[in-house]
Image: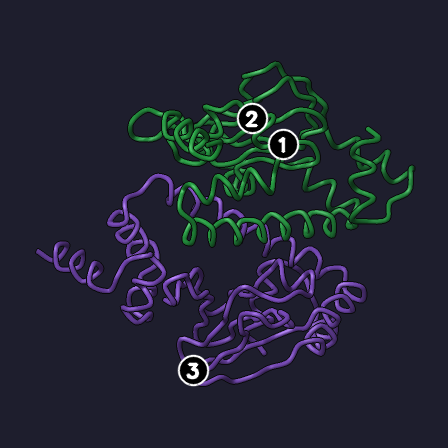
Chain colours: A purple, B green
């Protein structure tokens, strides 16, 4: 749990006693590679924080192909925010890309946590603010960049993205076919 | 100010006395149509809440064309979140689409406000959470929908969008040329 405590310390001041209470609202689970945490069409019960490993969020498109929209590595949250907050069915799937160690919290525990520890409002305000700022940037890139530029941008900004994520998932995230990604990589190498 | 009080009441409990203190951290301004609030390349000093009217955020693309990425009507916030929180130069412009009445707050006032009124952490947590949830949905639409589907989706979900926003800005937001938007509209009417 030192990982999560160290992560919280970056945003808020929280002593060991309060942390012990905060952490009691969460569950820890271990997942195998490719294990599903959330399925499309089911109520979005949890949000997930990656202690170790990597998760991804995807939906099945019209052609029946998995379209990845988000990855989460260490110290990042992932969920279907809309469906979680409304406790509705999700349009997304969440799956482990690697063997992972996950902290998760359900909606009712989150409400109790926020009531008992208002400092966590500040923490989650900062988490969502950062996530929203990243989404604003990403939307701009989608307007502005060609697919090739977007790939180069991602590889440069997030080396882990290319090193850790299997190539077919990188393609899925970027909206490429795996063949097109191979072409771009070959072109960049030459 | 009743507008902002009524808006806050949807998220948090705040009595008149506390509200009087909260509102003292904000400034109110009136803008004319097409008036600029924030310019690309300048420090992002404020975030803006629309009391009345409509603002938009845009950047100038490689071809020198204004690319709108976001609109804000009544009861919505708009800023360059990343640049505001880091007090850095923004990559965006913010401009009034209509004559507007705006509440704005600078970074240092926001920090003092949050320190004095922690209940506003809860409010902003919910604001950013909602904004992030909307961005997650929008990213999915960008993967999933054709431009024509995206236009129909927007017109259906947000009638104000088509009714209030000039057609050339609707085109700019959707990444269409104005000609292409006219074609789609003609096709949908027929």
Rounded to the nearest angstrom, the CA distance separating label 1 from label 2 is: 8 Å
Q: Label 3's element?
A: loop
Name the residue beneath numbered marker 3. A99
Q: Residue at x 29, y 69 (%)?
A: A168
Name the residue beneath numbered marker 2. B165
Of all chains, the one bearing label 3 is: A
Q: Residues within 10 Å of mark 2 (few under 14, many from 20)?
A: some
Left or right for A182, reference A157: left
Visible residue check, residue B105: no
Q: Nearer the viewer, residue B129 or B111?
A: B129
Of all chains, the one bearing label 1 is: B
Q: Residues within 10 Å of mark 1 (few under 14, many from 20)?
A: few
Q: Residues within 10 Å of mark 3 (few under 14, many from 20)?
A: some
Q: Label 1's element?
A: helix
Q: Are marks 2 and 3 on the same chain?
A: no
The label nearer to you, 2 versus 3, is: 2
Q: Where residue B155 sits in the image (x, y, percent)?
A: 55, 37
Rounded to the nearest angstrom, the CA distance separating label 2 from label 3 is: 48 Å
Q: Residue at x 72, y 50 (%)?
A: B121
Name the residue beneath numbered marker 1. B160
2 and 3 marks in contact (CB < 8 Å): no
Q: Are marks 1 and 2 on the same chain?
A: yes
Q: Earlier in the sequence, mark 1 or mark 2?
A: 1
Left or right for A37, reference A187: right
Rounded to the nearest angstrom, the CA distance separating label 3 from label 1 is: 46 Å
Q: Where residue A92 sits in the image (x, y, percent)?
A: 51, 66
């Amino acid at each position: 749990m030192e990982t999560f405590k160290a992560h919280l310390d970056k945003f808020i001041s929280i002593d060991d006693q309060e942390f012990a209470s905060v952490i009691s609202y969460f569950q820890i689970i271990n997942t195998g590679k490719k294990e599903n945490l959330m399925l499309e069409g089911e109520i979005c019960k949890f949000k997930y924080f990656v202690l170790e490993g990597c998760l991804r969020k995807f939906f099945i498109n019209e052609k029946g192909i998995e379209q990845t929209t988000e990855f989460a590595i260490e110290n990042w949250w992932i969920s279907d925010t809309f469906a979680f907050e409304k406790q509705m069915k999700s349009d997304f799937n969440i799956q482990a890309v690697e063997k992972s160690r996950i902290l998760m919290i359900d909606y009712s525990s989150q409400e109790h946590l926020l009531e008992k520890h208002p400092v966590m409002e500040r923490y989650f305000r900062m988490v969502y603010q950062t996530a929203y700022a990243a989404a604003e940037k990403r939307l701009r890139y989608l307007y502005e960049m060609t697919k090739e530029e977007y790939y180069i941008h991602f590889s440069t900004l997030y080396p882990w993205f290319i090193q850790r994520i299997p190539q077919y998932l990188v393609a899925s995230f970027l909206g490429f076919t795996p063949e097109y990604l191979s072409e771009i990589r070959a072109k960049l190498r030459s």
